[in-house]
């Protein structure tokens, strides 16, 4: 681990404002260190505040159903082998209606077949975007047709945001909670 999240009693004024906003938007206790990417965000509150608000908007004000969002996040977490992101979002995906079998297929790098067309669209779009760093005309047309133009912007922003979160988690080696086996091996180049 390369980073320890600051404790609430060590925060300056700007950090405490951000801490309270993260705790509020993520339903976290206000007397414990924040898990995941939030600790590093506290080091630079003017950036962390923007990341917090973007994440809040993408997570809680999205233009599509929650399963679409969680599938995109899981594909991103697997692509980045982001242990904390995977750990945090598997339960959210299951609560959103993504089956355990689909979650396991995503983990193995396989293409799950979803009954819901937009769930399939989320997987296929995220996979192509992360693998090729772009979308073919066919994939883009499917995304725009399935989610609408605004939904397409929302979904691509979601993937970009979680790429950044995954980079933060991996760079600072943010661990899963004690007693949990990391889903991906730590790879150092």
Image (tube, rainbow, N blue to C red):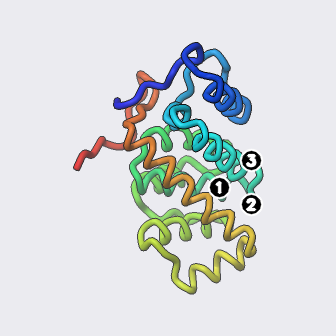
Instruction: Identify the element where label 2 is drawn.
Output: loop
Spatial CA distance of label 2 from label 1 is 7 Å
Q: Tell which of 165 and 130 is nearer to you.
A: 165
Q: How many marks?
A: 3
| Mark 1, other Cα within 10 Å: few <14 / some 14–19 / many ≥20 | many
Q: Which x, y percent locates residue 140?
A: 60, 80
* Closer to viewer: mark 3 or mark 1: 3
Q: Residue sitting at 39 percent across and 43 percent down?
A: 170
Left or right of 103 in this view: 140:
right
**Residue 46 seen anywhere in this rendered image of the structure:** yes
Q: Which mark is residue 60?
A: 3
Q: Which x, y percent locates residue 6?
A: 50, 22
Spatial CA distance of label 3 from label 1 is 10 Å
Reading the chain from its start, which is encountered first: label 2 or label 1?
2
Left or right of 36 in this view: 147:
right
Q: Which mark is residue 69?
A: 1
Outermost residue, bottom side: 137
| Residues at marks 2 and 3 touching, judged by CB atoms closer than 8 Å | no
Q: Quadrant of residue 178?
A: top left
From the viewer's perspective, is residue 118 above or below residue 162? below
| Label 2 sits on residue | 64
Q: Which x, y percent locates residue 89?
A: 57, 43
Instruction: Identify the element where label 3 is drawn.
Output: helix
Q: Residue sitting at 71 percent across and 32 percent down?
A: 21
């Amino acid at each position: 681990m390369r980073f320890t999240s600051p404790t609430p009693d060590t925060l300056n004024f700007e950090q405490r404002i951000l801490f309270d906003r993260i705790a509020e938007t993520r339903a976290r206790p206000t007397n414990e260190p924040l898990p995941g990417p939030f600790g590093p965000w506290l080091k630079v509150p003017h950036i962390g505040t923007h990341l917090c608000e973007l994440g809040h908007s993408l997570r809680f004000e999205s233009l599509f159903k929650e399963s679409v969002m969680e599938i995109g996040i899981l594909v991103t977490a697997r692509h980045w082998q982001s242990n904390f992101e995977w750990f945090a979002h598997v339960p959210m995906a299951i609560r959103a209606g993504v089956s355990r079998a689909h979650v396991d297929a995503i983990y193995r790098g396989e293409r799950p077949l979803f009954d819901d067309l937009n769930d399939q669209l989320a997987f296929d779009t995220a996979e192509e975007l992360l693998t090729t760093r772009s979308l073919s005309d066919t994939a883009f047309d499917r995304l725009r047709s399935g989610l609408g133009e605004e939904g397409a912007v929302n979904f691509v922003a979601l993937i970009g945001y979680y790429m950044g979160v995954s980079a933060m988690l991996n760079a600072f080696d943010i661990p899963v909670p004690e007693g949990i086996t990391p889903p991906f091996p730590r790879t150092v180049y």
